[in-house]
Amino acid sequence: MKTIQLGNTGMQAPAVAVGCMRMSSLEPAQASTFVQTAMELGMNFFDHADIYGGQGKCEEVFAQAAAGIPRDKMILQSKCGIRAGQYDFSREHILSSVEGILKRLGTDYLDVLLLHRPDALCEPEEVAEAFDALHAAGKVRHFGVSNHNSMQLQLLQKHVRQPLVANQLQFGLGHAYLVAAGTHVNMNHEASPERDGGVLDYCRLHDITVQPWSPFQFRFDKGRGTFMGHEEWPKLNAKLDELAVKYNTDATTIALAWVLRHPAKMQPVIGTMNLNRLRSCANAAEITLTREDWYALYLAAGNTLP
């Protein structure tokens, strides 16, 4: 598995991260096989959140599945800040959340802690206090965010002493807003408005690794769905199949290779618990699409160029 540098940490991490949101759906033996297979593929970066599986169940299942793996062979990332009916970036909630995460994962420290969706009542000074306490205690080594725009990042970084090293954002062929506005600059087109304050360029400028979540998803507000093989995406699937033949692989690999081809050196977070799809995603790191093929997929997904 190819590696990337995570933010400005100097840490080398696999180009594809393993999302553990669905791990609670696996039986213990299945979970162990899944984690071991990921490790064998070089995918030793595991992404969690304290809400996955309900009350952190996914973290507990993972801890049991990874019990025989040396801690220093894995990179563990988790997220906090989402509560029932609200978001909470208070000092007390961050600190208590991390204690729960560490207990469920059976570890003394997290390699990375991300703040989940932005808290409208966030007081960055409190976040800074929490980060300082966690870092000084050796409980969290690096920090980042999820679903934050560029101004939100700037506000946090003004107060937080540790560099923000990652930002999880939705991105993929079915949700390409991160790059769409950048191709329609100064145009009166539907794709022209910037939805996120140019967050992709901001992250590149400040050495913040973008971690695309749900890279195969196309619909979030109306329920989760993947464009792979979907009847509403015939042109995209035809092009994916065509390029799968060209590169001697499968459509899943090509769809993820499209994300990895972007020069931002993103680290997509995949959510599959299927071993065959896991292997297909691992293979994506070994393929570099040509510029022509990248744009052909972009257009086949219904995106436009001025």
Image (cartoon, grey):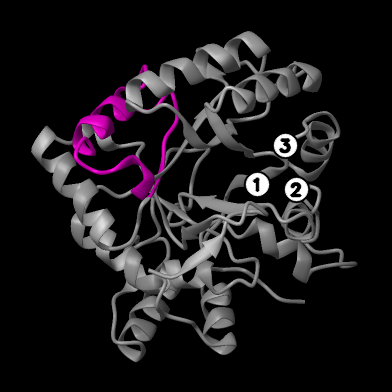
**Which stretch is magenta?**
45-73
- The crowd level at tag 1 (other Cα within 10 Å; few <14, some 14-19, many 20+) is many
Residues at discs 2 and 3 in contact (Cβ within 8 Å): no
Amino acid type at image mark 1: Val
Does the magenta-highlighted stretch encompass residue 61?
A: yes
SS at circle 3: loop
Taking 69 as reference, is 13 above or below it?
A: below
Say if 148 sits above or below 116 in the image.
below
Please identify the quarter of the rendering in which residue 47 is found.
Answer: top left
Q: Residue at x 23, y 39 (%)?
A: 66
- Residue 76's x, y, as percent? 42, 40
Q: Given the image, on which type of amino acid does mark 2 rest? A: Arg
Q: Which residue is mark 3?
A: 162
**Mark 1 secondary-structure assignment:** strand
- Going 57% across and 89% down the picture, which residue do you hit? 292
Q: Earlier in the sequence, mark 1 or mark 2?
A: 1
Query: What residue sits right under mark 2 in the picture?
Result: 195
Residue count near mark 2 (Cα–Cα under 10 Å), binned few <14, some 14–19, many ≥20: few
Q: Which residue is mark 1?
A: 165
Q: Nearer the viewer, residue 271 or 6?
A: 6
Kind of residue at badge 3: Gln
Question: Mark 3 to mark 1: distance in Å?
Answer: 9 Å
C-alpha span from label 1 to label 2? 22 Å
Quarter assignment of residue 108: top left
User: Which dot, 2 or 3, sits closer to the camera?
Assistant: 3
* 172 to the left or right of 192: left
Residue lying at the far top in this picture: please name it: 92
Given residues 248 and 128, the one toward you in this image is 128
Closer to us: mark 3 or mark 1? 3
